[in-house]
Each structure stands twice: as structure tokens, then as C-alpha cells.
């Protein structure tokens, strides 16, 4: 690998210190960033060029320590220990340097080629925290660079250091005399040719951590001298005789104390109350009385802006695209393109794509940026903090709230994000219940049904408020279902007690308004839209073919719909709706368009030159309030889309859990729709 | 000296850790976050349902559940 590249680099650091920001700034990639610990959950790499030389850089998941045992930390540690790389860049948070130094010291112990990058210098400056970078460099004996990666400050210096740093010799941490003696006993006999420091190898041999020792043996090869094996045994006995039983504990404590000692020398707080402002916001957001209502209100606020803002552009897009449909159809006829192809392309593929764009794009383009702003500010961990007690009662993890928040954007992202939950049992609960949070593909379905059946199209303020309230109730219902299912799961197939919970509440950061909006539209909205389009185009063709190929005078589509109809009716839906959900399996965005297409093809109604007539199409096909409610519920509670299921398969590595995550929400959705439908039939 | 456990601290209390009685894996997790014997921490937040609570330690705010914080014995710091 080194042949092509000048240097291979690894970025490592505590969670949420801006590794991804630095990675993005260097490589020009747009890896998702956000203000909460655990955003980057897998290794990503990228290339960049500096002074005409190519570099390869790895972005490792955030980790507090390399001694601990979570999967993520093991991935990071193994990478630092065993992967071939020339430089390790440890990214630190200037605001809480002390805790970050802990990791720096651990890495200095493993390998020599270390550069320390103290990021978020701008945040530290705002909080009047001064850091003596030169002194830090002197003490650690490694290059130290201060950066503010979000505003591109210091990156050039970092690049220069990356280019010019060779033969770094970081400090050794001195443990107590007994441990040092034991380490030296082993070190004398280590003659491996590796990039690992002998001291580190010695400590790991002393420590009874089989996992890493086995990996070390594999890495170093098995040519051990008799002397080495003997010296390890002697050193172990020596420690035992000197009453040092928990070596790991002694070592971590020494490192933490060393970090504290260094921090005291290089960090100066000019304003002792630098956290005061954060604490004030915290008090408001996590207050007994105001905490929960503020959360719900801000959720409603986002919905309100999305609904109101999306109304008008939706209408314009709709009218525009359907004018375009006519023009294209006439053009194709004029060009003598065979009628059947013209029909398939324009009345099939184009029409459904036009529906998707006009109904789905505006809410997405508004919701994603708004949510990104919230993500960036650091509010989401507070939501997890507020809701943790609820999750604890369900024997689940409070961080599940974070994965749920991610799911508002996309369920697959929420599934991947579940890696921030340490306990495997709790992670499975989060994955299995994840689909109760409607993603951005399902929002527009729910919103348009609400608009059509509960509010009406006129975009008056009161209408938008009613829509918002109904949507919020739907979301709260989803959250309630998440809690209930988590509880049921942890009492049945995923039995267990809640594990320990330690979550960092990061300092608030002012989101970079325009940057966030730009990137969320560019990266997320466009990406999701493309996916929806890629699905809707062929779906349109299939629908058209289905509805135009007749067997015994009845179209295939009608056959399918008629077949599904009895079951659909039983749960308050109909055959067309079920068909739409089945065909919408690859992307939920196309559910409503498929319904409309289905209704149009099986009925005579064909004039729908404006968006207000959509409701008529539905009503003419037997929709009532009951159908609307059941469709909303079913949209909230049914199987995850194909992308999400694939992600679940990848994350759980088990067909069993994937199938269960398919069945669980579907069965619950069917039961609830069945109940609602029957209650309606009884009383109305 | 007033010995008590971390979960009993009120918002604004500054305490020093005397002993951590958690099981080893949790103890390790605490160590990662800089929570060890003799560390000083301040209780800064209680969640709306009183659990978990958040503590300021070594410049960061860490949320801990009562089940975990009750195993940390602390003493009051007069500072």
C-alpha cells in the first residue's frame, strides 16, 4: 500500500472532537458530521494531495481509550497496533484537553510516529481557555498543532507537519518502581523488528489480556527466545510478590494522573465559569417542567416549518411537471415514437416520477437542513438524557433516543448508528424497534394524507397548525410504540437488565448555518431524492405494464388489487393501498404515487390537472376518515424498506433478527389497523 | 467527614471520589472518562425524571444512571 503513497495516516481521537471535519477538510469528502459522540461508526479512508504528493488517510471511530473492550475501541486499537501506517494523528478537543490527553498518552505508548492535533481552538478561545501548544509539544516530545477545522484554520500547518515529521520519540509514562522493574525485565529480551514500542509489548505480556496477547503473537510471529518467555514469567511473579494484582488498574490510573499533570501545565482557564452558558441552556432543556415540553415543541416547530414551507413549492412543481408531461407526450407523438413506448415512458415512468418529485422533494428539502442544524448544535444528546429513564424502565439504553433521531432522516442511518449502544442486547432492541420512527420517505405520505383528509389544502396558518399537531401525535404514537416494544422485547426474547450508561453531553456549538444547509441539501436531500427517483422510474413502468396487460379482459394490476382487496378491507385499507406498500418496498416515497396510479388505472377519473383533485381521486375510490387513519398507522408500522433491511442484515449478521425486524412492526401494524377498522365499523 | 454516594449529590455539589465499587468492566468504562479515585466532580444536572444525572468531570459533562452512580463513594469538597 505504501508504494503509491507518500505516507499513510490514521486519524484517531475521542468521540466528537472533529475527526470527521478534519478528514473532510483534507480529503474534500463529505462524511456526515454532527455534534454528538459516535457519529463516525466505521473506518473510512480517503486520499489527498499535498505538495504534489499523494497521501492516504483513515478516519477511525471515536474512542475514549484503547484499553477498554467495546467493539469500536478494539477496531481502533487493532488499527493503531497492527495496520501499516506511517503517522498517527491524534485529534484532541481543546475545550477538554485533559481527558483527550489520556488517549494521546496511550497511543504514545504503542507507537512512536504520533502527531497531536488540538482541534476546536476557536471554541476554546470563546470559552477563554488558553492552551500552551509549545509547552505541550515539549512535554510530549511530539509535534503539536492547533486547528479550528470547521473554519479551515491551521490545516496547512498540520499538512506541513505531516509531510515533515520523521523520527518522533514521544515520552514514556513512568509507572511506579515495581512496574518499571517488571517492564524492564521483559524489555531486555524483546528483539522484534516491529513498529510497536517494546514497552507496550512488555506491558501487554504482563497484563493478562489474552485477546491482545494472541493478536500480538500473531503479529510478531512466534519466534520467541527462551529468555523472553522466562522473563515474562519472572516479571509476572515479581509483580505478584510485590502485591500488584490489578496491573491494568495501576496503569490506567497512572496515565490519567499524568494527563492531569500535563493539563495543569499547559491549559489555563481565564474564565473559571466557562461552562456557565452551557449550563444555563442545559437547565432549560432538561428542566423538570420545561424539558419535555420544549422537546416536543421544537419537534412541532420543525414539522410546522416543513409543512407550511412545502405547500407552495409542491403545488408549483406539480403544475409545472404535469404541463411538462403534456408537452413531452405531444413531442414524442410528433417524433413518431411508437405509442406504446410513449405511453410507458410518459404516462408510466414520468408521471410517477413527477408525483414523487412534487410531493416528496419540498418537505425533504426543508426537513433535512432543519434537522441538520439541530444535530450540529448538540441538542440531541440532551434528548437522550431526558428520555433515558423511560428507556431504562424498558431495560434499554438512553442512546437509543439518538438512533431514533437519526431515523427521522433515514432508518438505515439509525440502524448503523445503533453501534453507539455498547450492550449487544440493547443494540438489538434499538434495531428491532427502529422502524416505528417514520423516515423522510414516509413523512410526505403521512403529511399528504393529513392534508387531504384532516385539514384541506388551503395553506392558512390554522390549517398548518392542525396538520402539525396531528403529525406530532402520529410521531408520539411511534415513540410510544418504540417504548412498548422495547419493553416487550426485553421481557421476552431479549431478556436482560439495563447495562451501565455513561454518555457525554457535549458543549453546545453554534451551527454553521449556511454550511450545514448547503451540505444537507447537497449530500442528503439529493441523495435520497436520487434513490427515490431510481426506484420510481422503473416502478412507473411496471405499474403501467401491470395495468395495461390484460388477461381475460382484466389487467394484471386489477388481479393483484382484487386479490389483496379482502385482506386490505379487513384492516381498514384496500387492495390498492396494500399493493402500493408492497411495491413501495424499495422506497417508501413512491407509496402515495403508486396508490394514485392504481386508482387512475382502474377507474375512469383521468383529469387531475391540479393537486386539489387528488383528494377526489381517493374519495371516489372509497376512502373515508377510517381509511386515512389506517393508512397513516400502516405507514408508521410496517416492514422496513429494502435498504434498511439490508443494513439490519449487515449490522446484526443474522437472518433471524432481520426477519424479526420485518415481522415485528408489520404484525403490530396489521393488528392495530384491524382494531381501528373494527372499532370504526362498530360505532360509525 | 461526610461520606456518601454519588447519586445522593445535589446540583451544585462538588465532590471527590473515595472509592469505586462497580464491577470491573464498568470501572474500566469510568476510567476511560477519567472517573477514578481522587477525581473531583460536580453534579450539574438532573434529568426531568431525576435519573440519570450529569456530572462535570475534567472539563466534560458526563451523564450517569443512578444504578451506576450509587456505586461511587464520594466525599464532600469544601471548595
Image (cartoon, helix red, strand yellow):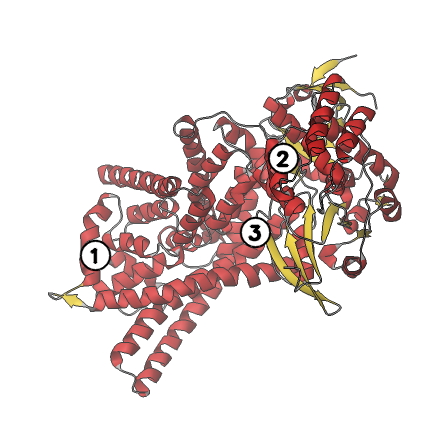
Q: Is residue A190 left or right of residue A534?
A: right
Q: State yes or no: discs 3 and 1 in contact (Cβ < 8 Å).
A: no
Precedes in sequence: disc 1 or disc 2 = 2
Per the rendering, the mark at residue A560 is: 1
Above or below, A32 against A673 in this view is below
Task: Name the residue carrying label 3.
Answer: A371
- Are there few (<14), some (14-19), or many (20+) residues within 10 Å of tag 1? some
Residue A102 visible from this viewpoint:
no
**Observer-nearest of A119 and A456:** A119
Task: Point out the residue furthest to the top here.
Answer: B1
Q: Position of residue B26 (x, y in %)?
A: 62, 27
Give the structural element (helix, strand or loop) at label 2.
helix
- Are there few (<14), some (14-19), or many (20+) residues within 10 Å of tag 2? some
Distance from the alpha carbon under mark 3 to that under mark 2: 45 Å
Give the structural element (helix, strand or loop) at label 1.
helix
- Which marked residue is nearer to the observer: mark 3 or mark 1? 1
> Which chain is disc 1 placed on?
A
Q: Position of residue A501 (x, y in %)?
A: 59, 30
> Which chain is disc 3 placed on?
A
Distance from the alpha carbon under mark 1 to that under mark 2: 61 Å
Rendered image quadrant of residue A74: top right
Per the rendering, the mark at residue A213 is: 2
Rendered image quadrant of residue A659: top left
Q: Position of residue A367 (x, y in %)?
A: 53, 55
Above or below, A336 against A684 in this view is below
- Which marked residue is nearer to the observer: mark 1 or mark 2? 2
Precedes in sequence: disc 3 or disc 1 = 3
Q: Is residue A362 left or right of residue A641?
A: right
- Are there few (<14), some (14-19), or many (20+) residues within 10 Å of tag 3? some
Amino acid at each position: 500500500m505504501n508504494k503509491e503513497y507518500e505516507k499513510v495516516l490514521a486519524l484517531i481521537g475521542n468521540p466528537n472532537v472533529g475527526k470527521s471535519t478534519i478528514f473532510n477538510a483534507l480529503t474534500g469528502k463529505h462524511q456526515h458530521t454532527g455534534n454528538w459522540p459516535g457519529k463516525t461508526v466505521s473506518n473510512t479512508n480517503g486520499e489527498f494531495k499535498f505538495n504534489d504528493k499523494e497521501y492516504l488517510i483513515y478516519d477511525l471511530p471515536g474512542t475514549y481509550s484503547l484499553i477498554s473492550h467495546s467493539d469500536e475501541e478494539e477496531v481502533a486499537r487493532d488499527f493503531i497496533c497492527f495496520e501499516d501506517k506511517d503517522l498517527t494523528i491524534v485529534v484532541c478537543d481543546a475545550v477538554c484537553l485533559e481527558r483527550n490527553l489520556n488517549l494521546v498518552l496511550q497511543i504514545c505508548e504503542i507507537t512512536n510516529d504520533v502527531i497531536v492535533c488540538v482541534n476546536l481552538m476557536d471554541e476554546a478561545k470563546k470559552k477563554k481557555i488558553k492552551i500552551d501548544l509549545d509547552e505541550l509539544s515539549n512535554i510530549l516530545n511530539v509535534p503539536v498543532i492547533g486547528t479550528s477545522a470547521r473554519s479551515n484554520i491551521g490545516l496547512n500547518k498540520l499538512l506541513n507537519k505531516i509531510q515533515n515529521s520523521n523520527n518522533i520519540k514521544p515520552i514514556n509514562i513512568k509507572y511506579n518502581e515495581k512496574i518499571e522493574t517488571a517492564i524492564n525485565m521483559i524489555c531486555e529480551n524483546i528483539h522484534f523488528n516491529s513498529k510497536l514500542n517494546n514497552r507496550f509489548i512488555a506491558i501487554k505480556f504482563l497484563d493478562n489480556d489474552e485477546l491482545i496477547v494472541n493478536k500480538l503473537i500473531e503479529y510478531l510471529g512466534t519466534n520467541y527466545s527462551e529468555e523472553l518467555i522466562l522473563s515474562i514469567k519472572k516479571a509476572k511473579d515479581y509483580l505478584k510478590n510485590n502485591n500488584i494484582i490489578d496491573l491494568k488498574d495501576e496503569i490506567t490510573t497512572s496515565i490519567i494522573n499524568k494527563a492531569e499533570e500535563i493539563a495543569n501545565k499547559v491549559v489555563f482557564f481565564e474564565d473559571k465559569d466557562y461552562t456557565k452558558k452551557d449550563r444555563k441552556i442545559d437547565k432549560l432543556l432538561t428542566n423538570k417542567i420545561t424539558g419535555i415540553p420544549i422537546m416536543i415543541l421544537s419537534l412541532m416547530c420543525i414539522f410546522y416549518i416543513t409543512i407550511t414551507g412545502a405547500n407552495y413549492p409542491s403545488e408549483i412543481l406539480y403544475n409545472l411537471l404535469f404541463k411538462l408531461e403534456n408537452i413531452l407526450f405531444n413531442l414524442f407523438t410528433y417524433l413518431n415514437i411508437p405509442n406504446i413506448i410513449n405511453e410507458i415512458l410518459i404516462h408510466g415512468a414520468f408521471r410517477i416520477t413527477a408525483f414523487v418529485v412534487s410531493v416528496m422533494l419540498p418537505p425533504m428539502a426543508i426537513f433535512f437542513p432543519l434537522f441538520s442544524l439541530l444535530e450540529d448544535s448538540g441538542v440531541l444528546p440532551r434528548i437522550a438524557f431526558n428520555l433515558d429513564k423511560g428507556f431504562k424502565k424498558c431495560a434499554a439504553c438512553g442512546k437509543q433516543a439518538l438512533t431514533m433521531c437519526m431515523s427521522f432522516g433515514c432508518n438505515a442511518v439509525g440502524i448503523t448508528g445503533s453501534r453507539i449502544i455498547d450492550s449487544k442486547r440493547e443494540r438489538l432492541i434499538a434495531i428491532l424497534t427502529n422502524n416505528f420512527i417514520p423516515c423522510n420517505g414516509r413523512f410526505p405520505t403521512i403529511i399528504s394524507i393529513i392534508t387531504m383528509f384532516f385539514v384541506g389544502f388551503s395553506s392558512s396558518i390554522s390549517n398548518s397548525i392542525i396538520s402539525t399537531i396531528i403529525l406530532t401525535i402520529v410521531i408520539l404514537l411511534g415513540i410510544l410504540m418504540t417504548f412498548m416494544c422495547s419493553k416487550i422485547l426485553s421481557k421476552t426474547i431479549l431478556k436482560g437488565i439495563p447495562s451501565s450508561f455513561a454518555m457525554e453531553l457535549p458543549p453546545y456549538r453554534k451551527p454553521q448555518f449556511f454550511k450545514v444547509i448547503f451540505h444537507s441539501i447537497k449530500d442528503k436531500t439529493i441523495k435520497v431524492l436520487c434513490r427515490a427517483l431510481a426506484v420510481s422510474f422503473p416502478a412507473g413502468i411496471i405499474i403501467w405494464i401491470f395495468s395495461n396487460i390484460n388477461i381475460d379482459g382484466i389487467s394484471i394490476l386489477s388481479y393483484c388489487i382484487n386479490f389483496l382487496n379482502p385482506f386490505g378491507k379487513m384492516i381498514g385499507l384496500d387492495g390498492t393501498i396494500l399493493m402500493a406498500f408492497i411495491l413501495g418496498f424499495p422506497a417508501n416515497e413512491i407509496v402515495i404515487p403508486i396508490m394514485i396510479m392504481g386508482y387512475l388505472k382502474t377507474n375512469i377519473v383521468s383529469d387531475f390537472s391540479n393537486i386539489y383533485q387528488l383528494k377526489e381521486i381517493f374519495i371516489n375510490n372509497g376512502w373515508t376518515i377510517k381509511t386515512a387513519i389506517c393508512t397513516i398507522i400502516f405507514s408508521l408500522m410496517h416492514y422496513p424498506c429494502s435498504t434498511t433491511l439490508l443494513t439490519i442484515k449487515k449490522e446484526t449478521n443474522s437472518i433471524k433478527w432481520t426477519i424479526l425486524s420485518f415481522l415485528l412492526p408489520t404484525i403490530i401494524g396489521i393488528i392495530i389497523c384491524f382494531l381501528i377498522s373494527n372499532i370504526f365499523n362498530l360505532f360509525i | 467527614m461526610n461520606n456518601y454516594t454519588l447519586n445522593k449529590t445535589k446540583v451544585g455539589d462538588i465532590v471527590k471520589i473515595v472509592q469505586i465499587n462497580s464491577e470491573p468492566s464498568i470501572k474500566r468504562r469510568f476510567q476511560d472518562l477519567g472517573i477514578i479515585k481522587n477525581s473531583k466532580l460536580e453534579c450539574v444536572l438532573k434529568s426531568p425524571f431525576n435519573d440519570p444525572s450529569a456530572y462535570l468531570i475534567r472539563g466534560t459533562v458526563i451523564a450517569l444512571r443512578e444504578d451506576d452512580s450509587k456505586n461511587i463513594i464520594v466525599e464532600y469538597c469544601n471548595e
